Every structure is written in structure tokens, then in C-alpha cells.
Image (spheres, rainbow, N blue to C red):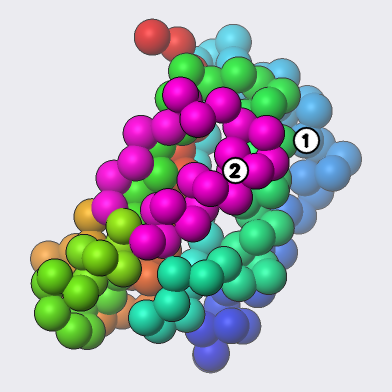
Amino acid sequence: MSTVRVGLIVAMLALAGCSAMHHQQAAALKPHGEPTKLILFFHPWSPALTPEAKVIVDHAAQIVKDTGPSTVTIAGYTDNDGSAADNQKLATQRVKTVQDAMIADGVDPKLFLSIPLGPPEDTAGMTGDRRIEIRLTYGN
């Protein structure tokens, strides 16, 4: 299965029912204080958002504006292809891309905690490692 197809499937799953359930889910998030995690994927060696990833970023920004988390953590991962320095730079670029898109969507820049992690140590260049995880944390 291609990366684009996997990204599209993830986007579709992430957004399935979001329009109808968004406000109910958003209302349920804050009182319980449970973190919410959204995941988006990138093409190899690219910091650019795919159309599917942009949909997820826009949805995350709307959740942030609706529910008011205390922290928005953006963790960036790469695969193991290339040098550690190149992967760290790419992870940083991807984190910045997502943060900038969310700020453009109206999210307060002071909420962000950005963590460019690069490649995980326990995988061998897996497609699923070319991702950003957006975690919304509620409470202190």
C-alpha cells in the first residue's frame, strides 16, 4: 500500500464522523483532562503537508480553539534513511510546518511545546515513522 494511500486512510479514519461528533467530543475532552492525540504523515524527505495532513492540522486547530488545552505538543519523527543530522533537521522542519499552520489557523503560539525527535531507535526506516503527533493536554 502506498504512503499516499495510507495517509489518506489515516486522514479518513481520523475525520470519520468528526463533523457530527466534533462538538460532543470536544465538550467531553476538557472536563476529563485526558490528552488527545492526532497523527499525520509526510512523504519521504519532505516537510510539506500533504492534503490529507492539512485536513488533520486544520481539525486539530479547531479542537484547540473549541476546547482550550493547556499544552499543544508537536512531536516530529522521521524514518532511519539518511544521516542523524539530516533527520533531525527534517524533524525540526516538519514540527515548524505544523506549528505554523496551526498558528495560521488561529491557535495561540504560547500553547506549543515542540519536540523534533528524528528517527526512533527501534525501527528500520518504516513509513509510519514519517509522522507528526499532535497531543492536546488539558489541566495543569
Can residue 63 be seen at all in this image of the molecule? no
Looking at the picture, which amino acid does disc 2 mark?
Met
Q: Secondary structure at mark 1?
A: helix
Does 65 sit above or below residue 116? above
Q: Main secondary structure of the magenta part?
A: helix
Crowding at dot 1, Cα within 10 Å, few <14 / some 14-19 / many 20+, comes out as: some
Crowding at dot 2, Cα within 10 Å, few <14 / some 14-19 / many 20+, comes out as: many
| Residue at numbered disc 1 | 22
Residue 38 falls within the magenta-colored stretch: no
At x 53%, y 90%, the residue is 1
Looking at the picture, which amino acid does disc 1 mark?
His
Q: What is the number of the mark on residue 61? A: none
Task: For marks 2 and 1, give the one nearer the viewer.
Answer: 2
Between 107 and 73, the residue placed more toward the observer is: 107
At x 40%, y 44%, the residue is 74
Residue 96 falls within the magenta-colored stretch: yes
Residue 87's spot in the image, x, y percent?
22, 71
Does 84 sit above or below residue 69? below
Q: Is residue 52 left or right of residue 138?
A: right
Q: Is residue 4 left or right of residue 75?
A: right
Are circles 2 and 1 on residues that touch, CB within 8 Å? no
* Quadrant in the picture for the C terminus: top left
Q: Earlier in the sequence, mark 2 or mark 1?
A: 1
| Residue at numbered disc 2 | 102
| Magenta stretch bounds | 93-116
Q: Quadrant of residue 66?
A: top right
Looking at this view, name the residue that lies furthest to the right. Answer: 20
Residue 98's spot in the image, x, y percent?
51, 52
